[in-house]
Each structure stands twice: as C-alpha cells, then as structure tokens.
Amino acid sequence: MLASERRSVAVVALISMIRMFGLFALLPVLSLYAADLQQATPLLIGLAVGAYGLTQAGFQIPLGALSDRIGRIPVILLGLAIFAAGSALAALSDSIYGVIAGRLLQGAGAISATLTALITDATRAEVRTRSMAVFGIGIGISFMVAMVAGPLIAAHFGVNSLFWIAAVLAIVAGLLLGLLPEIPRPVQRASWSLVPAFRPDLLRIDFYVFLLHTIMTATFVALPFLLNDRLDMALTDHWKMYVAALLFSLLIAVPMIIKDEHEGRSQLIGIAVTLVLGAQLALTFLGFSVAPVFLALVLYFAGFNFLEAGLPARLSKLADDDVRGASLGVFSSAQFLGAFSGGLIGGRFLGQGRPADVFFVCALLAGIWLALQGFGRLRRESA
C-alpha cells in the first residue's frame, strides 16, 4: 500500500475500533445487567441487547447514500454525535425501557457503511482486500479487548460506566478524523436511484452478513447465562474464557484471511460457516464443562473473524464505484438487522432459562447458511 493508503486505513480502522468497543464491551454483560432492571422480561432483555441493530439497519442505507452525495466526513461526524447521545441516555436510565431507547438511539448513528466506503475511496482496487482485512482485524481486536475489559469495568464501576465510556470514545473518534490525509470525494451520480445497490450478487453477501450477526447476537444473549449458571463462572472471570478463545482462534482465522486475499476462494466461506455450525452444536450438546465450551468458542471466533473481514471485502470489490456508499449501506443494514433479530431470537428462546435452546436455533441458522452457500457455488460453477 502507498503511504497515504496506509495512513487512511489505519485512521479509519482506529475510529471503527474505538466506536465498536463501546458496543462490544456491553455484549458479555448487558443481558445480565438488563435482567435486574425495572420491568425486565426475557424478551425485553433480548431487545435491549439487539435494539441498536434495528435503527442501524434503518439508517445505514440513507446515510450511506447521503455520503455519496455530500461526502463521508460530515456523515461520520453526525453519526458519532447521535451515538454519543444514545450512550448517555442509556447510562442515565434505570428501567429496561430507558436502556432500550438509548440503544435505539445508539444505532441511529449508523456510519459503518460510510466508514467502509471511506476506506474504498482511499485505496486502490488491488489492495482493497488487504485494506478490508486490516479493517476487519481491527474490529476483531476491538472485540477481543472489549470481551476482556467489559466484564472487568462493569464489575468495578457498573454497566452504566460502559455507556459513558462509549459516549466519550465517540467524541475521541470524531477528533481522529483530523488525522486523515486528503481523500478524493466519491464520484457523484446524477440519479439518486439505489437499484444498482440491490444486484443479486450483492444481496447474496448481504444475506450472509445478516445470518452472521443474527447468530452472533443471539449467542451473546445466551452465553453469559451459560458461563454464569451452568459453569459457575463469576462475571469477572468471563474475560479469561473469551480472550483465550479469541487468541487461539487467530491461529485459524489469520491463515484463512491471508489465503482469501491471495486466492479469493468461495470455499473459504463454507469452511468458516462450518466452524460456526460446529461451535453452536458443541455449545448446544456439550455445554456442561469448561473444556468443550472453550473449544466451541475457539471455532466460533475463528469463523466469525474470517467472515467479518471477508464479506465486506468481497462486496466492496463487486459494488459499482458511484453507489458504493449505498451498496455498503445495504450490507450494513443487513448486518445490523441481523443483530436486532439475534437479540429477539436470543430473548425468545432463553425464556425457559435454557441457553442450549438458543444455541440450537443458531446451529439451524448456520446449517441453512451452509446449504445456501453450497447451492450458490454449484449454480455459479454450472453457469
């Protein structure tokens, strides 16, 4: 990569890492915290975990399209300001409905598509996959740090402190935009039509990321209860399981990302989905002791991290240049709609207090995904 490309990718990846930390740090603790709030029910707990995904899904396309017209930076600043306001609202709330309202407002700061589009504006096509991999790995690192820090911070200062930290980090992320080099403005189309963003080959990737984040959010609605109730792990010890599993998962995920950059083989998506499927089945049927749960998380994080990096890289190369923001908006909308759906699924199937029910539904979703991936590959090969 050129020096300007390296700087742009590094700054955008850092902004995304800081912003996503505020969301990820809540994942391992929010469902337990929400259970103690006024008027909490299992369904409302799941909604509190996944609510941000609904407004993220609703605003990614219009904000992504707006960034194609007025530029990426103004849209990013607007989204960060809204995210900070939502974080403050949730921090000040003492009822489940207030937290849900704050999470919905957090999600309205929907800039994931615009950040991804900014990377594509700043890089050449021949280094696009590498750039997206750096972006995805950065999010993976943020995820890993958040899994460690979230429970520790919550145990010492309360879950409310995580919302305040998210608000402050959003402000810091906005200041980091000043470190970006000059990046060409996106090509502006005469038409506002979004039809090119809904091509079948793009929608297939959009559906894959929907499934990925449905499974991820549902898993993290149920997983804290599995660790806390079935394995008798204190909340302050959950991070040990997460960080060890994440580190071991990199031994699988990183070689897959490197191979994907050089070869771009669609079979790697099938392998990653198989890892997610195996992990969910292990959590369903073997979640009675630490060792099988740990191995399941290694497999899950390996598949998740590869897909989190590989799917946007594929879509950014396929999308037309003049609707890239809108195309990535559709992708991000599918991603966060998956997060919302996963929260509802997790809350619904956790209603009887059995985390295994949630993991089994996630296994079914992964099985459907694997079947669709194999069917789609056969159709492309025969065409």
Image: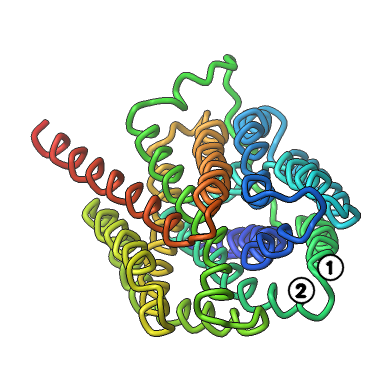
Residue 181, x across and y down, in percent? 69, 56
The amino acid type found where label 1 is placed reads: Ser
The amino acid type found where label 2 is placed reads: Ala
Horizontal relation, residue 369 to residue 164: left or right: left
Residue 154 - label: 2
Q: Is residue 237 above or below residue 15?
A: below
Question: Based on the displayed image, in which of its 4 quarters is residue 170 positioned?
Answer: bottom right
Q: Which of 215/183 is in front?
A: 215
Residue 161 - label: 1
Indicate the secondary structure of the residue bearing disc 1: helix
Q: Is residue 295 above or below residue 338?
A: below
Residue 182 - label: none
Q: Which of 88/36 is in front?
A: 36
Indicate the secondary structure of the residue bearing disc 2: helix
Q: Residue at point 25% right, 54% down?
A: 270
The crowd level at tag 1 (other Cα within 10 Å; few <14, some 14-19, many 20+) is: some
Question: Based on the displayed image, in which of its 4 quarters is residue 3 positioned?
Answer: bottom right
Report whether residue 237 is seen.
yes
Q: CB of mark 2 within 8 Å of CB of mark 1?
A: yes
